Image (cartoon, rainbow, N blue to C red):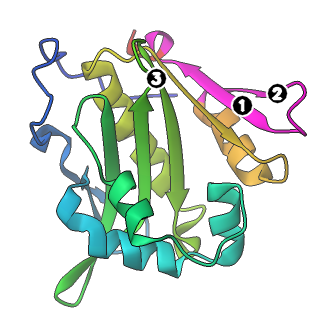
Amino acid sequence: MNLPPPRPAVESGAARGRYPAELERVWEAPGAPPVTIRALRPDDIDREERFVAGLSPQTLYLRLQYVTSQATRRDLERLLDVDYYDRLAVGAFVRNGAADDIIGVSRYARIDDTSRAECAIVVADDWHGRGVGTELMRTLIEAALARDITCLEGSTLPENLRTASWARRFGFGVRTEPNSGGLVKVTIDLGTLAG
């Protein structure tokens, strides 16, 4: 997989609390309006709420790994509790009239006292298969590398074949967790991508 060259790493702790404007860019999806990719901020909560509400029940279930019809405001606040170093979320936005709508989100949360982080990604149903997930993950990896994270890992349900297949193509190791009821773990060593 071809990643953009990593930007110089920030000094340890320097990015905490500082919005990472260096991650902002516009990406052109074939046959689609321009997509702005940037870090999410706590004031994106209404956009995040609209995004989650617009996900199909199947996509929401595959992402959350349990059945629900909506995310609570508290859930959304927790998702947007970012410090831009140990916890960071990246969104893909398209212009809709006078507002920007989220069409996808990737995020990581560092595992305490490690250089590993749990990651997740979800893309709006209408944008599946159009490269949004790949662009979000490229940006998330760039941010993680600059913040001393060496490995991203996540999990998905066994029936989420689309995500497992995408993860393999992207370069993640994919394996079924023992004694988990079939839960699939995906892991990528960022050191192998930085060279």
| Residue on which the image places disc 1 | 185
- Name which quarter of the figure residue 172 lies in: top right
Residue at the (39%, 30%) spot, across then down? 141
SS at badge 3: loop
Q: CA distance from mark 2 to mark 1?
A: 6 Å
Q: Position of residue 30 (x, y in %)?
A: 43, 65
Q: CA distance from mark 2 to mark 3?
A: 19 Å
- Name which quarter of the figure residue 60 lies in: bottom right
Residue at the (60%, 61%) spot, across then down? 129
Q: Amino acid at mark 1?
A: Lys
Magenta part of the chain: 171-192
Q: Earlier in the sequence, mark 1 or mark 3?
A: 3
SS at badge 1: strand
Residue 139 vs residue 171: left or right? left
Q: Position of residue 158 (x, y in %)?
A: 84, 46
Q: Amino acid at mark 3?
A: Ile
Q: Earlier in the sequence, mark 2 or mark 1?
A: 2
| Residue on which the image places disc 3 | 111
Residue at the (82%, 27%) spot, across then down? 177
Q: Residues within 10 Å of mark 3 (few under 14, many from 20)?
A: some
Q: Position of residue 54 (x, y in %)?
A: 51, 80
| Residue on which the image places disc 2 | 177
**Would residue 29 be seen by someone viewing this image from the given angle?**
no
